[in-house]
Image (tube, rainbow, N blue to C red):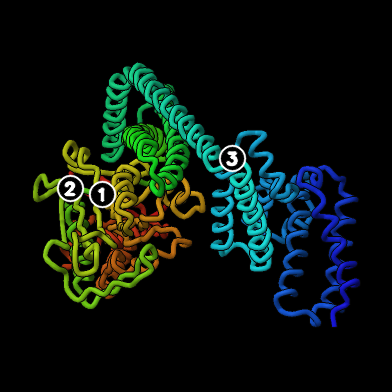
Amino acid sequence: MVDNDRLNKILEQVKIIFTYDLEKLSHEDDVKRIQLWNDLKNSESIFDRELCMDLSPDLRAEITSQFSFAELRLAVAEQAEVEPTSISNIFNATELSIVPGYDKYNIFDITSANELAERMQRKNDIYHLALQYVKEYSALDAILDSPQIRVDLKIFLKKRYQERLNKVNEGLQIYIGRYGLGHAVKQIEKSVLEIIKQSEKQRVAIIEENKRNVDELSVKLKSLPEILQKTDRFNDNLNKMESQVSTGASFQDLKSLEPIKNGLADNYMSLEKEIADKISIIEQRNRELAQKESELEKNGQAYSQSEQEEKQRLINNELKEILVVKDELGTRSATLNSEKDNLEIKRLEITDRLRQLNEIAEGKSIRYISCQDARLCEMNFLARFDTKMQAYPLKFYSPIERKEFVIRSWPEGAHVSISDQNSPDSPWNVQDRYVVSEKKHGMFGEKVNKIIIEAITLNHLDEFDKYKFDSRSANLADFLNTVNRIIDKAEVGKYLHIIGIASPTGWDEKVQSEVKSTTFAHNYMSRFVSFCLIDSVTGEMIFNPADERIAKYIEYFIPEFNREKIEKVRQYIMRRLAVKDYVVLDEAVNETKEPKAAVNKVFYDLHHEGKGKIKYIKEVGLVIQTVK
């Protein structure tokens, strides 16, 4: 037998907290809130110890839910403090966000159905009240569907939301019974027409604002061609200096280039900010249009079930006009984002290039890669990739589809290879792509991409064309210039795109550090794209260890070297260094009869280990010397 008096006494602490609205509870001092918390937890403890097991499961769950929601209210109020205590840590962010939305509609808790009906008549706002009614259903659905909200809170909110909804429904029925359906319809029609007028006014204002923004930005971007010309001259100067150093010449004064670099970088940042500001405005306007669109769609659904065809037509026409403006804004936003990305790449290119040259001037070693060596690295990397992609059966998992795809052979058109082929002795910058696809509707419909696995070779073709070699490590600008277009396509298609990008000159340390950081994915990447970077000379792999997606695909990009051949070359070079103090790469290839790629790898392995120093000597080629 349940002791109801005892139960009501215990629940008094819950009722006390429920008499506070969130604003009042937040303004109580710490001592008062802590006392409320302690009293509540004490009552809950007594309930668990003395009464809990005597209740039916449903009643037990209902009372437990009341305690939980009372605790949540105190936690949210405490969270507003400058130095919150540990109370708020009991709940997650999603749970803490419930209370403000719940309190927003607390008028339904303190108003009877009769009072609601009178308010509808007195304030003439039945339509807006009906909208709140719909929003309550949406809020409840979102709460019940969320895996981040604990069950006892869902139990409390489901019951309280339903009580509110029932009260609103009863109030509507009382109102219609007293004043007639015709009066209610007139109110609703008046509100709908007002919303359409507001939407038209808002839409026209957005179109005019967008035109002004385009004109303003066009004026700002008039300086861009001149900035790009200055950038090209700056980069040409850097290329010449880098080529001179690679052949043994001394550096010019790099300090004289700093003001030029800073001026260009400031120009780019200024334009990037201008574009970012316009994008922000566009995104805000799109959100406003989406909100108005949702409001009109709800009204359209109501009218589609009645005979108000003219009102339905007005709503549909306005929805079409909104869609046109949203499409225009979306296209404009995409264009501006692309332009901003290009400016960022240009800025990063000049800042990273000069930084890399300064590091070389301070004694950092550089890697010299000839056209032929770069092409050899490219062919070896792609040959290994293609071999592994033909080793059936292949199993690829997509976290987007939450499905594993098994490939027993590649259908026609699934393997695509494109390049910037120039000459057979120079690298081609190949994109070697395998596409996993399915028909859109099972056995029918067009094929849609599910996973793309792509090997990309990254070479500075301009340097190879002008100087027949390259010594510049791939940097952040190179990386972004390669992946930005891929990210855009993957996000539109909503498929997983896996990329392995191989550079024969290696990867700048700044890129390596960024890639392995926790902020890199947030700043530059997408949930639809995952990648790894490969040094195609040494075989080093660079990727974010926290990215579980790429971990399943690394094996397809890992360079492989014959261990016996590498060891044979290594022993040869170590013996020669002990006797002669230096070894020429071409001579080592001829004498060991091993592939040039293997000798190249050993040269750079020994260099990184501090057992040799690599240098390029004109008319001789690449040489490794004894460290003195």
Q: Do the residues under discs 1 and 3 have CB atoms within 8 angstroms?
A: no
Note whether residue 341 is visible. Answer: no
Of circles 1 and 3, which is in front? 3
Residue in the foreground of this view, choosing between 15 and 422: 15
Disc 1 marks a residue whose amino acid type is Leu
Q: Residues within 10 Å of mark 2 (few under 14, many from 20)?
A: many
> For the residue carrying disc 3, how many other residues have a C-alpha within 10 Å: few (<14), some (14-19), or many (20+)?
many
Q: Residue at x 26, y 68 (%)?
A: 569
N-terminal of the pair, mark 3 or mark 2, is: 3
Image x and y of residue 108, in percent: 69, 48
Question: What residue is at 32 percent from the left and 48 percent from the top?
Answer: 483
Q: Give coordinates of residue 572: x percent, y percent.
A: 27, 68
Residue 396 to residue 27: above or below? below
Mark 1 lies on a secondary structure that is loop
Q: For mark 2, what is the residue?
A: 371
Q: Is 474 on the left-hand or right-hand side of 86?
A: left
Name the one closer to the observer, 499 or 122: 122
**Mark with earlier residue (1, 2):** 2
Q: Is residue 434 above or below residue 422?
A: below
Q: Label 3 belongs to which residue?
A: 126
Element assignment for label 2: helix
Quadrant position of residue 286 = top left
Counting other residues with Cα less than 10 Å from the Cα at mark 1, is it few (<14), some (14-19), or many (20 or more)? many
Pick whichever, 365 or 283, lies toward us: 283
Q: Amino acid at mark 3?
A: Ile
Closer to viewer: mark 1 or mark 2 = 1
Q: Quadrant of residue 316?
A: top left
Asked if residue 454 can be seen in this view, the reply is yes
In the rendering, at what x and y percent does residue 196 appear? 43, 31
Q: Position of residue 336 (x, y in %)?
A: 35, 32
Q: Does 483 sit left or right of 543 as displayed?
A: left
Q: What residue is pinned by disc 1?
A: 458
